[in-house]
């Protein structure tokens, strides 16, 4: 009887510890998916050094996700594993969401970007790196807002093609970019599965912002990139030779 009470006591003492939440730091790059442990009835927070702009989740019906500044709160609504991609102005973070039982789930996760390249080594030039194409095409909305299409790149692991732009405002005061939209079309029809992020919402005279357009990596066919700002618009053709 005493031994039985002893083991029951141990179970009651250690049981809450086994189910406790934890705080940890994870390093993410474009070659590694990090697992995030969640628990039903609990919210977990992913804290980034960059402000998240957009998320893509595999089974969105089973998860509740909210943005709060640099934080992303996740709460599982069902016992379903899925993948999660978080897009910031400069990086794409990949995670595997897992609902765990009887384990130390993640209360707070500090997410750090760690390049796969060694800091002591020079990274390859953009023009020579496989999967990248330098472009240098220019277009503008009127005379004040100028766009430079810098390059395209591919991410085969996530079946994405990315188009990077620089946005420069050369007006006299400042420009609000909250209504700025990018739409890729072919034959006047918007391409399916596209998205975009813009680095800054406000530009002062001479300031430069960055933008990235995301397209499904299906076929290397040219398309028209349209830019809209309120009632103003402009466009440019991205030829097939830049999408190889």
Image: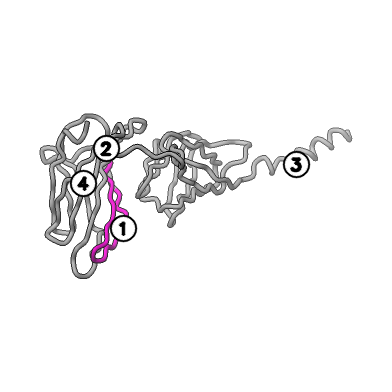
Q: Residue 12 carries which label?
A: 3
Residues drawn in magenta: 197-214
CA distance separating discs 3 and 2: 62 Å
Residue 131: give x, y in percent of width and height. 29, 33
The earlier-in-sequence mark between 3 and 4 is 3
Q: Mark 4 points at which residue?
A: 149
Q: Which mark is residue 68?
A: none
The image's colour scheme reads one colour
Residue 228's x, y, as percent?
A: 17, 53
Residue lying at the far right in this picture: please name it: 2
Q: Give the CA separation, mark 1 to mark 3.
A: 52 Å
| Left or right: where 190 falls relative to 29 | left
Residue 205 lies in quadrant: bottom left
- Per the image, label 2 sits on a secondary structure element best described as loop
Instruction: Measure the alpha-carbon separation of dots 2 and 4.
Output: 14 Å
Residue drawn at the location 52% of the way across and 39% of the way down = 36
- Give the foreground label among 4 and 1: 4
Please check the rendered image and state whether residue 209 is part of the magenta-colored stretch, yes or no: yes
Residue labelled with disc 1: 200
Nearer the camera: disc 2 or disc 4? 2
Compare marks 1 and 3 and give the one earlier in the sequence: 3
Residue 1's x, y, as percent?
A: 88, 33
Distance between the Cα atoms at labels 3 and 4? 62 Å
- Classify mark 2: residues with Cα within 10 Å, few (<14), some (14-19) or many (20+): few
Q: Tell me: 111 left or right of 164.
A: right
The residue mark sitting in front, 3 or 4, is: 4
Which residue carries the number 2 mark? 127
């Amino acid at each position: 009887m005493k031994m039985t009470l002893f083991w029951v006591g141990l179970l009651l003492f250690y049981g809450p510890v086994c189910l406790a939440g934890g705080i940890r730091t994870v390093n993410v790059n474009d070659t590694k998916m990090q697992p995030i442990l969640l628990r039903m009835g609990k919210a977990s927070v992913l804290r980034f050094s960059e402000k998240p702009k957009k998320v893509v989740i595999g089974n969105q019906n089973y998860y509740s996700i909210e943005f709060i500044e640099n934080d992303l709160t996740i709460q599982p609504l069902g016992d379903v594993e899925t993948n999660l991609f978080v897009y910031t102005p400069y990086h794409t973070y990949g995670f595997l969401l897992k609902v765990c039982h009887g384990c130390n789930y993640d209360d707070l996760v500090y997410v750090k970007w760690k390049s796969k390249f060694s800091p002591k080594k020079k990274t390859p030039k953009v023009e020579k790196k496989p999967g990248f194409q330098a472009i240098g095409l220019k277009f503008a909305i009127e005379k004040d807002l100028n766009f430079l299409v810098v390059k395209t790149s591919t991410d085969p692991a996530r079946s994405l093609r990315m188009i990077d732009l620089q946005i420069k405002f050369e007006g006299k005061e400042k420009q609000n970019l909250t209504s700025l939209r990018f739409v890729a079309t072919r034959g006047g029809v918007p391409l399916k599965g596209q998205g975009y992020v813009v680095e800054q919402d406000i530009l002062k005279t001479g300031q430069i912002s960055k933008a990235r357009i995301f397209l499904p990596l299906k076929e290397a066919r040219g398309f028209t990139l349209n830019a809209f700002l309120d009632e103003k618009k402009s466009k440019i053709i991205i030829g097939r030779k830049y999408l190889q």
